[in-house]
């Protein structure tokens, strides 16, 4: 019985090793390039106050005064889409947005909202946040307009 188990184990291992390649026929597949992100050519800044993140937002203009109507719309979107993981003023599943602009650029915040998978995979700050909070940011499929309204709401905290 022990010999049979040993022979089956060796056979399974040999089959697995053979299936993994090593022959010249499978070499082209093994060296095929992984798909590139549409943002892969962008250099990612590590200074949190210069890093704009990875995504569609490259520039955000914040007015001197908070746009109250936009901030209210942002609050409603935040409560509907974000409040399961984020509390405005305290650490929860994710970080609190209060004071976010002392820690991140507006562009980074919007890109994290709009493009969380790419950010967590390739942005050093987002990677560190994942290590700290152990839960990736959920993609809520928001529009840039919705993300901008949430950003305006964050200015009121």
Image (cartoon, rainbow, N blue to C red):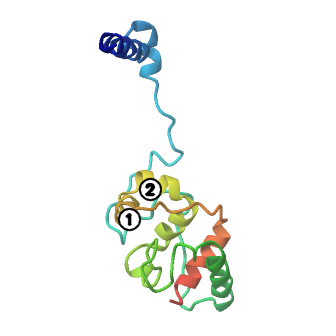
Q: Which residue is mark 1?
A: 129
Report the front residue among 139 and 44: 139
Residue 58 makes an appearance in the image: no
Residue 67, position as x, y percentages in the image: 63, 88
Quarter where residue 16 is shown: top left
* Whole-percent x, y for residue 41 in the image: 45, 45
Picture residue at 47% right of the left edge, 67% below the top: 108
| Residue farthest to the front, as pictured | 1
- Name the residue beneath numbered marker 2: 120
- The total of numbered circles placed on residues is 2
The answer to which image quadrant residue 131 occupies is bottom left
Observer able to see residue 40: yes
Q: Badge 2, how many Cα within 10 Å: few under 14, some, many 20+?
A: many
Image: 16 above or below 23: below
Badge 1: few (under 14), some or many (20 or more) residues near its Cα, within 10 Å? some
Seen in the picture, residue 113 relative to 54 is either above or below; the reply is below
In the image, is residue 36 above or below residue 72?
above
* Residue 42 pos. (x, y %): 44, 50
Instruction: Return the residue nearer the eye: 45 or 88.
Output: 88
- Tell which residue pokes out farthest to the top in this image: 24
Helix, strand or loop for disc 2: helix
Residue 110's spot in the image, x, y percent? 54, 68
Query: Which residue lies at the image location 37% right of the left edge and 76% below the top edge?
Result: 103
Residue placed at 43% from the left, 84% from the top? Answer: 90
Q: Earlier in the sequence, mark 2 or mark 1?
A: 2
Q: Quadrant of the N terminus?
A: top left
Give the residue displayed 66% in from the left and 72% down from the top. Answer: 146
The answer to which of 62 and 21 lies nearer the viewer is 21
Q: Residue 58 got which mark? A: none
Label pair 2/1, CB-CB below 8 angstroms = yes
């Amino acid at each position: 019985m022990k010999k049979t188990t040993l022979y089956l184990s060796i056979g399974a291992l040999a089959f697995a090793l053979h299936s993994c390649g090593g022959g010249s026929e499978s070499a082209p597949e093994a060296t095929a390039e992984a798909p590139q992100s549409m943002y892969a050519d962008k250099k990612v800044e590590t200074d949190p106050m210069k890093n704009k993140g990875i995504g569609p937002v490259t520039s955000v203009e914040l007015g001197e005064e908070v746009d109250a109507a936009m901030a209210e719309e942002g609050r409603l979107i935040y409560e509907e889409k974000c409040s399961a993981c984020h509390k405005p003023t305290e650490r929860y599943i994710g970080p609190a947005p209060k004071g976010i602009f002392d820690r991140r650029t507006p562009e980074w915040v919007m890109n994290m909202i709009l493009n969380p998978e790419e950010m967590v995979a390739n942005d050093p700050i987002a990677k560190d946040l994942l290590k700290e909070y152990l839960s990736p940011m959920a993609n809520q499929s928001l529009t840039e307009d919705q993300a901008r309204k949430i950003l305006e709401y964050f200015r009121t905290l």
